[in-house]
Image (tube, coloured by chain):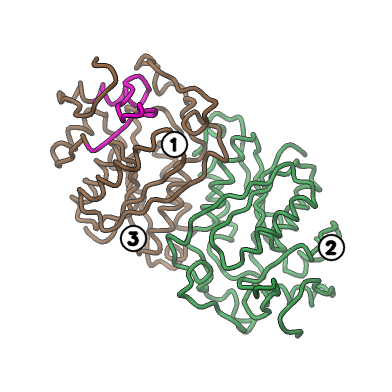
Chain colours: A brown, B green
Amino acid sequence: MGGKAVVLLSGGMDSATTLVIAKKEGFEIYALSFDYGQRNSLEIEKAEKIAVFFGARDHLVIPVHLKKIGGSSLTSEGMSLPRGRDLREIGKEIPSTYVPARNTIFLSYALAWAEVLGAGDIFIGVNAIDCSGYPDTRPEYIHAFEQMANLATKAGVEGNLKFKIRIPLINLSKAEIIKKGVELGVDYSLTHSCYDPFPNGMACGECDSCRLRLKGFEEAGFNDPISYKEIR
Amino acid sequence: MGGKAVVLLSGGMDSATTLVIAKKEGFEIYALSFDYGQRNSLEIEKAEKIAVFFGARDHLVIPVHLKKIGGSSLTSEGMSLPRGRDLREIGKEIPSTYVPARNTIFLSYALAWAEVLGAGDIFIGVNAIDCSGYPDTRPEYIHAFEQMANLATKAGVEGNLKFKIRIPLINLSKAEIIKKGVELGVDYSLTHSCYDPFPNGMACGECDSCRLRLKGFEEAGFNDPISYKEIR
């Protein structure tokens, strides 16, 4: 293996684990993050640290103006985040934290950068097990994006690159992701998952993302190294 | 017909004509433009005027940071634009003005906005006849994007909307586009096609885009109402 890979890096645990998997496969890492007016702007800081820590060759942070479009409780002040939901409820319906076409926008920028770099592999840390039920984390969506990507680009059409959207976490539970990450040396204290952290950076422990993370650490048998508002 | 439609509006003649076609079909128009650091920032001003002139319900201009990614003579100062090319050469090979994944990024934002608005129809003025030979203006690409769009979104997956990427100009020559536009009341003095206009706004007349436009007007038998550096 080897060559260059673009890795979408949100600063969360899934993307950090994905980055390390790509590195382990021998890729030279080009990390790509987005500043999209998310409530959790701490994500960007975390992403910077992860990119440096794991020796990414370059790290681009692109402002994406999703607030102008709205339609999600992650980007709109007026919409409230679901909190304290039963874990069995999470993933059943698409929640208000869904950001319309977010992964499509992110993957499109990744595709642009990959083409300029000459990188055929684009890694994204989506997973279909312990997830929020977003449509744009499912394998059939990723497959359709990949098909489109190879028709959209000069490199794809001329056959210089075959774009592959790599989803190494797709069939792993949160606990399995954490176990794999720990094995590969991911320091999860560098990551952050909370949708709406407190001003001091502490995670809320109540949003869907915190709940899935906490459940994952519990099942994996590790302590989550980050700080939560309330100890549970 | 009717309902809402998102129309990609660059300020060029193709997108202006597309907007009017969508309006004629009875759609309420939501125009979407991008400020991507293109050499021709005049495009945005033109787009504003066109949106107002044709009574768009809303017009969003989204900054898209393609300069950070580079790889095109349209966005990189260091690359030179092709000029004065023989018309028979244009479209044979993908030229340096190709912007990696540009239409994919643009359509992704359009998809996000369309989902928030509840608009199933997204119009884009690509054409496959008198064009520059970009991969992301071909019908097979558009079709693949449409497939992906319906898997990417909550509205698509839940069946509330079926997204359609509408390409009314796909099989028209530039001359046919102009004839159609004139018939529908497009004022082409509001549009601008030059990749690299002079500071006073005059078109260069030499870039591929100017050459295709001039050829179109000549074949359609109309005078092009905009000003060129040199009369030819």
Q: Give the letter of the chain under mark 1.
A: A
Provide the major secondary structure of the magenta segment.
loop
Residue B55 location in percent, x, y? 79, 46
Q: Residues within 10 Å of mark 1 (few under 14, many from 20)?
A: many
- Indicate the secondary structure of the residue bearing disc 1: loop
The residue pinned by badge 1 equals A38
Q: Residues within 10 Å of mark 3 (few under 14, many from 20)?
A: many
Q: Mark 2 is on which residue type?
A: Val
Magenta residues? A190-216
Q: Mark 3 is on which residue type?
A: Ala
| Residue shown at the point (68%, 79%) measured from the top left | B205
Q: Give the letter of the chain under mark 3.
A: A
Q: Nearer the viewer, residue B64 or B165?
A: B64
Q: Mark 1 is on which residue type?
A: Gln
| Residue shown at the point (70%, 66%) measured from the top left | B192
The residue pinned by badge 3 equals A119
Residue A198 location in percent, x, y? 35, 26
The residue pinned by badge 2 equals B182
